[in-house]
């Protein structure tokens, strides 16, 4: 059990870029998740989180029933490949301070997600998981919190 494919969550639900913030939030609620990949039918174009909806959407006065996910999503998505080593993906998550990473196959199709929870439950090296959590949890720089 060394590759991300060994621990990732499969059968990921996506939202479309033109789906409303309300639809994305309802999907998150139904699935009990805090983030969804944004798929345009051909490729992964972003990620939307519950925080994106709250801070970039609701707090900015956007209407949740008519604002498109594409208006609040993060388009600079860090991904990994199914055959990458778990340690390498943990390092990527720590460096980018992200809790979830979409998993792609080598044909760039979305095949899963790996989360900090997946790592905590299944990663072989507990110390590296703790280091990853610590790196993700450090306060980020102010540029990451700017609105799009």
Image (cartoon, rainbow, N blue to C red):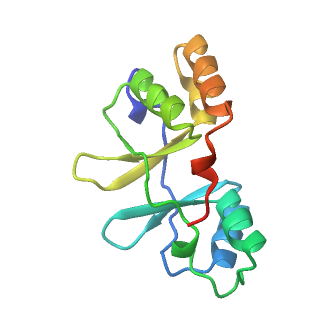
- Up-down: is 76 above or below 71? above
How many marks overall?
0
- The quadrant in which the N terminus is found is top left
Residue 31 visible, this orientation = no
> Position of 62 compared to 11: left or right?
right
Q: How far across and down, in percent of the image, does residue 140 sit? A: 63, 38
Q: How far across and down, in percent of the image, does residue 129 sit? A: 59, 21
Residue at image position (31%, 56%) is 109
Residue at image position (48%, 75%) is 17
Residue 44 visible, this orientation = yes
Q: Which residue is most to the left?
A: 107
- Up-down: is 92 above or below 30? above
Residue at image position (50%, 37%) is 96
> Position of 109 compared to 140: left or right?
left
- Up-down: is 29 above or below 115? below
Q: Nearer the viewer, residue 88 or 33?
A: 88
Residue at image position (22%, 52%) is 107
- The quadrant in which the C terminus is found is bottom right
Classify residue 135 by image quadrant. top right
Q: Which residue is most to the front?
A: 142
Q: How far across and down, in percent of the image, does residue 51 sit? A: 70, 57
- Up-down: is 30 above or below 121? below
């Amino acid at each position: 059990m060394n590759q991300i494919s060994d621990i990732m969550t499969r059968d990921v639900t996506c939202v479309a870029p033109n789906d409303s913030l309300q639809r994305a939030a309802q999907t998150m609620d139904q699935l009990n998740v805090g983030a969804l990949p944004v798929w345009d039918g051909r490729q992964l174009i972003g990620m939307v989180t519950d925080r994106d909806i709250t801070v970039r959407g609701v707090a900015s006065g956007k209407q949740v029933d008519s604002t498109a996910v594409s208006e609040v999503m993060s388009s600079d998505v860090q991904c990994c490949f199914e055959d990458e080593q778990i340690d390498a993906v943990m390092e990527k998550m720590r460096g980018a301070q992200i809790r979830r990473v979409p998993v792609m196959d080598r044909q760039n199709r979305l095949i899963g997600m790996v989360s900090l929870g997946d790592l905590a439950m299944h990663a072989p090296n507990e110390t590296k998981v703790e280091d990853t959590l610590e790196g993700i949890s450090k306060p980020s720089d102010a540029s990451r919190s700017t609105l799009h």
